[in-house]
Amino acid sequence: MKQTVFTALRILVVLTLLTGLLYPLAVTGLAQLAFPAQANGSVLHEGDKPVGSTLIGQPFGGDKYLWSRPSATAPFAYNAAASTGSNLGPTNPALVDAVKARVATLRKADPDNHAPVPTDLVTTSGSGLDPHISAAAAAFQVARVARARGVPASAVEAAIAGCSQAPMLGMIGPAHVDVLCVNLALDHRTVHL
């Protein structure tokens, strides 16, 4: 009996060292060597200042920015510690009211835009943290952003094109636009006009 207890304790110590210390250190080290940006959160910097992550959405206010997909995280939008969807079904009155309010906000911001509002500009994602929008959602916002910045629509379209990502392997998932990338590109261009 005594030998069984000591054997069990030795196995516990060995497995704890292997799976609790050595394996995490090896995986972390390998990730830092092979994928340093991704291993550190894919954070974008302007100089020494972090401005966001390519993996986590963030809110953008004002007409001069592309707006992100809405977030349902609590207690505030784009809360990475509380990744969640709204869990509201398509017939839920709260969802219908939220979508109507978002459509009204988009229409008010750009009253001359009579195009259909893309779904991803008025509904939240399953995680509530999407950093991307569809190409249609980006195109829907071009006129508003160009007008607010006093630049030609082609400048906004060029920034969107530069921050667009094709489907994975050319066929998995839809093409999408990195909102943070576009807004940083537009800010950089505006400074250098």
Image (cartoon, rainbow, N blue to C red):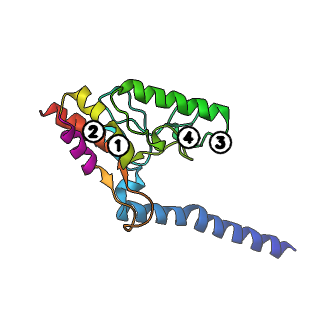
- Residue 103 lies left or right of residue 64; in this view the side is right
Q: Measured from the top left, where is residue 49 in percent x and y?
A: 30, 36
In front of the other: 5 or 82: 82
Q: Circle 2 sits in a helix, a strand or a loop, which is it?
A: helix
Give the residues drawn in magenta, as a range. 152-161
Q: Earlier in the sequence, mark 4 or mark 2?
A: 4
Name the mark on residue 138.
1
Q: Earlier in the sequence, mark 1 or mark 2?
A: 1
Name the mark on residue 184.
2
Which quadrant: the N terminus?
A: bottom right
Q: Amino acid at mark 1?
A: Ala
Q: Amino acid at mark 4?
A: Ala
Nearer the camera: disc 1 or disc 2: 1
In front of the other: 112 or 181: 112
Residue name at image x 57 percent, y 47 percent: 126
Q: Amino acid at mark 2?
A: Leu
Residue 39 found in image quarter: bottom left
Query: Disc 1 versus disc 3: distance between alpha carbons?
Result: 25 Å
Picture layout, residue 177 above or below residue 104? below
Q: Is residue 139 magenta?
A: no
Nearer the camera: disc 1 or disc 3: 1
Q: Which residue is mark 4?
A: 81
